[in-house]
Structure formats: C-alpha cells, structure tokens
Amino acid sequence: MERRWWRTTAIALAMISAWFVSGCGYNDLQGLDEDTKAAWSEVINQYQRRADLIPNLVATVKGYAAHEKETLEGVVNARAKATGIQVTPEVLKDPAAFEAFQSAQSGLTSALGRLIAIAENYPNLKADQNFRDLQSQLEGTENRITVARKRYIDRVAEYNKMVRYFPTNLTAKFLLNLEERPNFTVADENAVAKPPEVTF
C-alpha cells in the first residue's frame, strides 16, 4: 500500500513539475533571445554592407567633385565613427551603448544623404555607370537596413513582452537573468511629427 502511495505521489509530482516548467516560459524565452540575436546580426550585416560600399562611392564622386572636400571628408569620418563602435551582444543589454551605435549610424545616413545630393549638381557624375551602380546598391542596402531593423524591432517587442509578462517574468528575472532590450528610436521625434513642406 505504501509503495503504491509513493508511486502515485511521484507521478503526481512529475505531472505538476511538467506543468510548471511548460508554463514558466523557459524555452520560449530562450527561443526569443536567440531570435533577437539573429535579427540583430542581420541589422549589423546590412550596416556592414553599407560601410563596405562607401569607399567606392566616395572615390567615384571624388573624381568628379574634388572641390567638395568637406562633404567627402564628412562621409569618410562618419563611416569611421560608425564602424569604430565595437558591436557585441552586450550592446543589446546596454541602452547607452545601443544609443551610441544608433547615433553613429544616423550620422552616417545623414552624411550619405549630403553626398548623394552633391551628385545632383554634376550631370557627368550622375551619368557615370559606376556611380549609378553604386548608388543603386546603396539604395538597395538602405532598404535592406530598413527591413532588418523592422524585423529586429518586431523580435525585441515580442521578447520584451515575454520578459515583462507574468509568469514568464519570474523565469526571465530569477532563472535566466534576462532584462528588456533597447530598441531603435527616432532621433528627432519633433521632426517626424511635422508634415513635409511641398513647394513648386
């Protein structure tokens, strides 16, 4: 009789443990953590692709617009600043480091915009096949960056919800030591709120 009681108790404890473990979100949190890291890697991959294209673009423009030295140096310096930031998985855990990375990438985007605007003043440059190919690749890369950032934003939102929701927040905090991850933000929210001016 006592043996049967122990067996019944052991089975009941195993079932309760299985129910608790499946409801704690341990595996879900681990999966979302990996998904978030993979999405971040894709963002970094696309930023690196853009950084790799810039020297060729600058060299092509330099041949036509050598006197635009300030703009060309601005692009080179912005690229150096953006690629000089060490991007490790720890960046995802440090909001200040993430903000510094985001700021450097925004500076590079701005500098590239000025470089492309210069091309409008040089019809021969706009007609150059190398420049058009590089500009096309750069535009494609900017689109890929936007898509990669969107995927990362979605993954982080899903991850952060799991880290904050009960009961998975207990697993995240006490078993896995996971915290919310920072996400991309708009550098100047006031600029986004203003409608663009259209003049003819």
Image: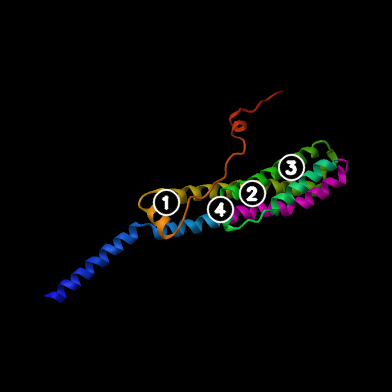
Give the Cα separation between the discs numbered 4 and 2: 10 Å
Pick the quarter of the image with the N terminus: bottom left
Q: Is residue 144 above or below residue 2?
A: above
Mark closer to the chain start, 2 or 1: 2
User: Mark 3: which amino acid?
Assistant: Ala
Q: Which mark is residue 111?
A: 3
Q: Amino acid at mark 4?
A: Leu
In percent of width and height, residue 110 lies at 71, 40
The residue sitting at the left extreme is: 1
Name the quadrant of the C terminus: top right
Q: Circle 2 sits on which residue?
A: 101
Q: Are marks 4 and 3 in contact (CB under 8 Å)?
A: no
Which mark is drawn over residue 162?
A: 1
Q: Which numbered disc flags the more N-terminal residue, 4 or 2?
A: 4
Which dot, 4 or 3, sits closer to the camera? 4
Q: Residue 136: x percent and y percent? A: 72, 47
Q: Residue at x 31, y 60 (%)?
A: 20
Decide if residue 126 is in sight here: no
* Picture residue at 78% right of the left edge, 52% below the top: 55
Q: Amino acid at mark 2?
A: Phe
Q: Nearer the viewer, mark 2 or mark 3?
A: 2
Residue, disc 4: 92
Please name whichever residue, 68 or 17, is drawn nearer the observer in this view of the structure: 17
Is 74 displayed left or right of 16 in the figure?
right
Q: Measured from the top left, where is residue 173 in percent x and y?
A: 42, 55
Label 4 crowding class (10 Å Cα cut-off): few <14, some 14-19, many 20+?
many
Instruction: Please identify the quarter of the rendering in which residue 11 is found.
Output: bottom left
Specify start and end residues of the magenta stretch as a single range.
41-67
Q: Magenta segment: does it hold 187?
A: no
